[in-house]
Amino acid sequence: MLAIKHISNPSEQLFHQMAEIEFWARDHEFKSNINTFSLNTYTKKYKKLLENDFILYTAKFNDNTIGFIMGCFNSQISQIDHLYVLPNYQNMGIGSKLFSEFKKHSAKIGVSEIILLRSAKSYHFYTKNGCSGTSNNSDRIMRLEIKNNQTDKSIDIITQMKQRIAELSQKNGK
């Protein structure tokens, strides 16, 4: 059974699982040599990201971590730094589910845009999930504007207040 879970305090063991997932996903893409792989290098990279405000979700299938999405955020923008799914689990919607949870979390904390740097191979995935950008490989930045429910509610309240003031003004002959 697939489970997508928000992680607020990742363990060393999870970092190792994430490193292995990234290695195998990148091995599939770049034909890396397993002898050059270093868990410590990847673990340090993930820990460095945790120095900022971060968002991390994992995908587990039968208690095995098979994918993850990780990024950082500030008051206006979330940035996706890593999204990997093991090759045997790709093209099953798992990456889209991870992306969707990242997007929901970003909206919940009031972020208005997600940005990411895509690979040539991931362009179709991100456009399918609502991001905009060019397929030109020299411009790899993609964006997704987030419709923030809190902002929409504030605008609705202001609109209602303006309408009520207009009604009262008309009623009082002003």
Image: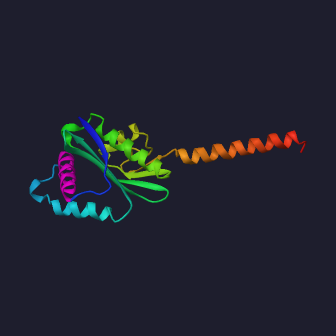
Q: Residue furthest left?
A: 35
Q: Position of residue 125 (x, y in %)?
A: 34, 40
At x 26% / y 62%, what residue is drawn? 45
Q: Position of residue 123 (x, y in %)?
A: 35, 43
Q: Position of residue 78 (x, y in %)?
A: 42, 54
Q: Position of residue 54 (x, y in %)?
A: 36, 58
Whether residue 131 sits left or right of residue 63 in the image: it is right
Q: Quadrant of residue 162?
A: top right
Residue range of the region highlighted in magenta in the rendering: 12-29
Query: From this viewpoint, is residue 139 visible?
Result: no
At x 17% / y 63%, what residue is drawn? 40
Predominant SS along the magenta part: helix
Most foreground residue, 122 or 161: 161
**Residue 2 higher or lower than 34, as above or below:** above
Q: Quadrant of the C terminus?
A: top right
At x 55% / y 47%, what residue is drawn? 150
Most foreground residue, 146 or 54: 54
Q: Quadrant of residue 169?
A: top right
Residue 20: say if magenta.
yes
Whether residue 120 sits left or right of residue 105 in the image: it is left
Q: Quadrant of the N terminus?
A: top left
